[in-house]
Image: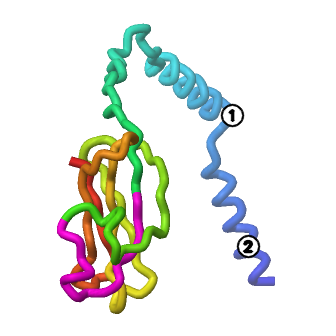
Amino acid sequence: MRHIIILLALSALLISCAPSPEQIERAIEQTQAAKEESYTSTPSNTNTPEPTNIQAPQKETYIVTSGYCLGYDPRYIPTGDPVGFEFCTIDEKRQTPLSSGDKITYSSFMPHSYPSFCAIHTLDGEYITSDIDVNGLGKAVCTLP
């Protein structure tokens, strides 16, 4: 019984703390007035930057050849173009669009036995550059000048 009386007293105290309907209505009006004052619109001119038109570098088509040479003995390593060198075998020859600074990498299937190479030629067969993996790292990297 004593618990019921305490519960009723607490309920009465809480009910008396609730806002009156007039107070609730006044708070709603103040909230709506504050919303109207804080309304902003986006201006028509937002100063959005214009996209920059950057020209992509022109790419030309080159012949890229990759393969491997017979071994690491100096007589098996060409001093220039490996294409057509008697101790080098071509694995792949393809046409590839490149621009200055582009790199072509070729990885060898057995870098400790056979040095890999890559070579770049123009479409009419003129030699431009090549790289031979003479250190046994497993890849040759050709960079178009």
Residue 116 in view in this figure: no
Which label belongs to residue 7?
2
Which element carries disc 2, helix, strand or loop?
A: helix
List x then y, in percent, for residue 37. Answer: 45, 17
Q: Is residue 1 left or right of residue 38?
A: right
Residue position marked by numbered label 1 in the rendering:
21
Given the image, on which type of amino acid does mark 2 rest? Leu
Q: Judge whether 23 appears above or below 89 on screen.
A: above
Tell me what residue is drawn at x 21 percent, y 82 percent: 75
Q: Judge whether 74 appears above or below 26 on screen.
A: below
Q: Which residues are magenta?
A: 65-79
Which element carries disc 1, helix, strand or loop?
A: helix
Taking the magenta stretch, the answer to whether it contains residue 46 is no
List x then y, in percent, for residue 78. Answer: 23, 71
Q: Is residue 53 left or right of residue 89?
A: left
List x then y, in percent, for residue 19. Answer: 62, 42
